Amino acid sequence: MSEQTTEKILEIDNLTVSFDGFKALNDLNFSMNVGELRVVIGPNGAGKTTFLDVITGKVKPTEGKVYFQGQNLRPYNEHQIARMGIGRKFQTPRVYLNLTVRENLDLASNRQKGVFRTLLGKPTKSDRRTVNGLLETIGLTAKAELQAALLSHGEKQRLEIGMLVAQSPDLLLVDEPVAGLTDEETENVGNLLLALAQSHSIVVIEHDMEFVRQIARTVSVLHQGSLLCEGNMDEVQNDPRVIEVYLGEQEEEAA
Amino acid sequence: MNAEVGNFAKRQQQKKQQIIELAIAIGLALVFAIVMPALLSAFRLKLLGRFVALSIVALGLDLIWGYTGLLSLGHGIFFALGGYALAMHLKLQLPEGQIPEFFTLYGVTELPWFWTPFYSFPLTIVAIFVIPAIVAGLLGYLVFRNRIKGVYFSILTQAALLVFFNFFNGQQKLINGTNGLKTDTETIFGVLVGSEGAQLAFYEISLLGLLLVYFLCRWLTTGRFGRLLVAIRDDETRVRFTGYDPTGYKVLVFAISGAIAGVAGALYTVQTGIITPSAMEVAFSIEMVIWVAVGGRATLIGAIIGTLLVRLGQTFLSEQFPEVWLFFQGALFLLVVTVLPNGIFGWARDWGIPKLRSLLGLQEQLITYPALEQDPEIQQEREELER
Ligand SMILES: Nc1ncnc2c1ncn2[C@@H]1O[C@H](COP(=O)(O)OP(=O)(O)O)[C@@H](O)[C@H]1O
Ligand SMILES: [Mg+2]
């Protein structure tokens, strides 16, 4: 039991990513236990999306290492990392608009992702059961046969989260899942993530403080590509450095 | 549970539709196979046979462009390779020890080594689709592995087309250069290729080929594989992050598309009587794109309709007013791109048929606001209430 809880799902050592000399991530250290739900916050341009880009293989580290379940991810590209068990939701919902909701989930849940297996294989009964279960979970059963293009913004967000889960990953990376959602949809997504957190490790990147309060256990604050501080919501909110760089800026934005 | 029931009903319905489609397609092909030869003069029938061959290459192009989103401007390469393969076999129908006549013009006395496999008919049939498939697969692998797509892919395919065109044009001593290979005066199974009987046979074979290629494409584009192609077209990055490697899929589809073009090229060549490097002119490969665009991308049927319509239009217009055809073709393309972005078939499917149905009273009459009558969530609630 104690072994299980102290096992690290994600460990990042001295990670630097520079774009033409500009350090989007700067000597970042980060670690996370199996089963944890972690919220990462930080002002615009702090490097949050880049952080996910490095973990998922879209961007390679300039320096430093990323370990997933103890394995260095550097030699692998995006689809290999996805197969190892990391699912990613993008900042803007990215689903296949010309396919139905069910077809979107089916493509993600396919266990055999090689060319010929996909060509010759047929969805099995258990595949279909998985998809039906997911439709329930994300609350889109009634719209299963509808083209994804016809979904509302919030429904697309939920569908994309459903597609992640369909991959049955160990680690979910979710980039700003409630940006642009109504209050009701925000709560739906929050509950969905909390439900998923019972069986997955999840990193949520978020801007919306109300939402962070709804779901957060541990919060990491990113600023100018480095980790500024870490702790529970109250600790983070009362940290003077955070107030200075993040909450202060939000007030500026609001003003 | 509800979802499973709905899904099951949908799959049953799909199966039924597939059978109907199969019946219609075979029925149509039979009509063309039996009625047209009785109706048309030998000259017209040969023309129709050529159009049928061209609509096969359009299907291949629709596969790679319409479904997978990769616009190839170099399909002339694969088309010509298929045509040359068959023409070389026909050129070799000679008494022992002789080589095709044109070689003597250039002082060549020994058959170039790569001609020898084409003595064999079975090897030739295989070469007609395997050689274009290999060339397309190799080209595709180099391009897709480096994640080249969009306009760059189109430009590269066109550059490859120019390379092949110039190569074939310049090689008199290997394949008769600009003059190409004439097939009309050769024999196949002892019958003159240009004879009426052989031409009728080629027409029927072209129809059969179209039918088979159509169902191959239908098979590829339905099911998970087909949906993955659409997914690659619409959001390749998402596909990668879902754990698929798009490279293999794109290489395979490009190779299949090339193979289909090769078959079309071979059938076209024997019904034209000659294959020359002009099959690899830029304009011809672009014309193929126009056929697919006019008929409607990612519809398959549209590719066939587009080819037949454009080519029929060309025949009639250029017989009446030879000067206006090119102008007309350009105008047609512009019109389709701007007014009917989904092509003729796409328009008919999305607009014409629903309109017709409602005019004929086949559409369900809606009493209230359509959003209420057709919203699936409301429908489901209603079903649950009724239970
Ligand atoms: N591919 C890239 N090339 C150059 N600069 C980039 C690239 N991606 C991100 N950046 C820069 O890195 C910084 C961090 O970006 P990002 O990770 O998107 O921030 P966040 O998601 O926290 O708002 C920004 O200043 C952005 O302009
Ligand atoms: Mg971001």
Image (cartoon, coloured by chain):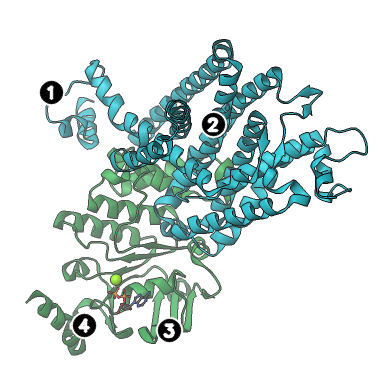
> Mark 3 or 4 closer to N-term?
3
- The chain to which mark 1 is attached is B
Look at mark 1 in the image and give the residue it sits on. B367
Q: Judging from the image, what is the letter of the chain drawn in green?
A: A
Query: Which chain's colour is cyan?
Result: B
Identify the residue at image location x=39%, y=27%. B9
Q: Work out whether disc 4 and disc 1 sit on a shared chain.
A: no
Q: If the image is split into quadrants, where does the N terminus of chain B sit?
A: top left
Q: Secondary structure at mark 1?
A: loop
Q: Are marks 4 and 1 in contact (CB under 8 Å)?
A: no
The amino acid on which the numbered mark 4 sits, given as a three-letter code, is Glu
How far is mark 3 from mark 2, CA to CA? 52 Å
Residue B212 quadrant: top right
B159 to B199, vertically: above or below: below
Q: Do marks 3 and 2 both belong to one polypeptide chain?
A: no
Residue that badge 2 annotates? B214
Q: Is mark 3 within 8 Å of ligand 1?
A: no
Q: Is residue A181 left or right of residue A231?
A: left
Label for residue A235? Answer: 4
Q: Amino acid at mark 3?
A: Leu
